[in-house]
Image: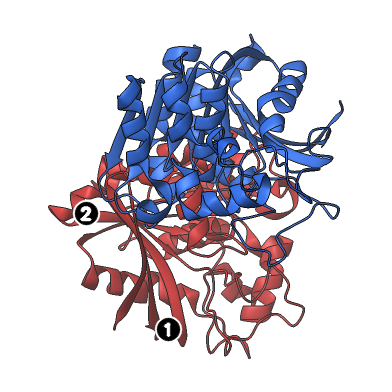
Chain colours: A blue, B red
Amino acid sequence: MSLENISSNKLFGGWHKQYTHESKSLGCAMRFAIYLPPQSLEQPVPVLYWLSGLTCTDENFMQKAGAQRIASELGIAIIAPDTSPRGDNIPDDPEAAYDFGLGAGFYVNATQSPWSQHYRMYDYVVSELPDLIEEHFPVSKKRSISGHSMGGHGALTIALRNPDRYLSVSAFSPISNPMNTPWGQKAFMGYLGNDRELWKTYDASELIKTSTVYVPALVDQGSEDSFLPEQLQPEALRLSASGVGYPLTLRMQEGYDHSYYFIATFIEDHLKFHAEYIL
Amino acid sequence: MSLENISSNKLFGGWHKQYTHESKSLGCAMRFAIYLPPQSLEQPVPVLYWLSGLTCTDENFMQKAGAQRIASELGIAIIAPDTSPRGDNIPDDPEAAYDFGLGAGFYVNATQSPWSQHYRMYDYVVSELPDLIEEHFPVSKKRSISGHSMGGHGALTIALRNPDRYLSVSAFSPISNPMNTPWGQKAFMGYLGNDRELWKTYDASELIKTSTVYVPALVDQGSEDSFLPEQLQPEALRLSASGVGYPLTLRMQEGYDHSYYFIATFIEDHLKFHAEYIL
């Protein structure tokens, strides 16, 4: 697999770089960003995968969250993939809706036409991208995963399904019970059809009920998030977790909203949480 | 003067808010952003004015620099104005160039037609905006000023011309000698005509030679900044400062470029520098 470097910026003593590569899972060229802390010059460093929310690319988190300052202190690399396949040959929602199709891959492997050929973000994030990263960059196999909103859903479901691959998981404002909320139902119906048993395999509040190997989890949710009542349902996640004694810390942050300003405020806590497990 | 609040986000215990108002100096509606740290609930706080570079609005710095974390710790408000007048009635460069007209006001009072009616960013930043801020928000009259690139030029020239109004000044990658570099020459010729004596009143490397009241100054410049050799000329500023014994600290930061990743890396140093004078 070949990588093309398309940008490079020094920050906090380390380097933010963007690359493109041909993705086998997705059948298109994909861009991702990596932050390599200064420690990576000396030895392989652990990795935090960050999954972004609806409409985002690899850039939103890298530009707005301020995570590199702490990653540089701790010696953690950060990988930010895109949120869907992209390109002229990639089908999009007929109405170009922001919550389905391009920029809205939901981190699933689609089973329905015309999505199933390219919309395989689950495989891309779980397997193809880590293989690529671990082949080409000075990183160890110690992985954590985090994300925001749709990406918080992605991080939780991926960690719950792959407890052998991730040492910790966290999320900001995750879509916690997608099969019972509008964004999730639209995405699951479109990508997965009407098989609700299949939906459960991509729903954190369902997966947590049957998990046996526990990945420590931290979730932050803003109390003034306009999507909270209809779309996010962290209470369902809390109930499922407490039902099985899952080690989930869910914090309601008073007055915060759904924006990157919220993420910037608490990303230091999340990185330090992950550091306990991957350092 | 009436203010309309158009957005509000909590971050780091404080609040980022955007407002619009009708500007008398500029003859149009203007948007600005303010960060109010939590300390502003208790008492008036000092203010850092941030002037952005070419193509920016009030949003770039607030979203990308990560300054609010430190402003919240220190108890400093930050104001980010737009970089030019805006609106359907505002003339723009006939070729919509990025370095003249909209998004490129250069913080001068234009004297040439058709710019002189609206392009009065100097008056707006020096007088109208602080008057508005100090009337409507819990801030003191202790002011510092900083900026990036075109905004670094703005911060330096405004502080040098108004040492009674600012307690400290800093800049990232400023256009340090605009009358001798292409961006500056284009802007000055357009906004000010060919009167080079007038140009000198907006050129930091000239102003510093004749200043008598010294505002402490910190400048950071990335060594890998692609605009450094042709456009920025910090060496001219250093020479002028050392010629008169001006208290300027100019730091060349090895490997850094012109982006907000550079600003994010060193903004903490700048805020702590200003804190020595305004707290």
Front position in the image: A144 or A17 = A144
Label 1 vs label 2: CA separation? 26 Å
Picture residue at 63% right of the left edge, 55% below the top: A100
Up-down relation of residue A57 to residue B35 (above or below): above
Residue A242, position as x, y percentages in the image: 30, 26
Specify the farthest residue to the top. Answer: A43
Left or right placement of residue B48 versus residue A119 in this view: left
Left or right placement of residue A60 versus residue B38 in this view: right
Amino acid at circle 1 = Ser
Residue B270, position as x, y percentages in the image: 42, 42
Q: Which mark is residue A93?
A: none
Up-down relation of residue A160 to residue A65 (above or below): above
Q: Are marks 1 and 2 on the same chain?
A: yes
Chain holding disc 1: B
Q: Quadrant of the N terminus of chain A?
A: top right
Q: Which residue is mark 2?
A: B45
Amino acid at circle 2 = Val
Chain holding disc 2: B
The kind of secondary structure element at disc 2 is strand
Picture residue at 61% right of the left edge, 75% below the top: B102
Front position in the image: A147 or B243 = A147
- Nearer-N-terminus badge (1/2): 1
Residue B153, position as x, y percentages in the image: 55, 59
Q: Residues within 10 Å of mark 2 (few under 14, many from 20)?
A: many
Up-down relation of residue B274 to residue B79 (above or below): above
Front position in the image: A29 or A157 = A157
Q: Residues within 10 Å of mark 1 (few under 14, many from 20)?
A: many
Picture residue at 36% right of the left edge, 53% below the top: A225
Q: Which mark is residue B25?
A: 1
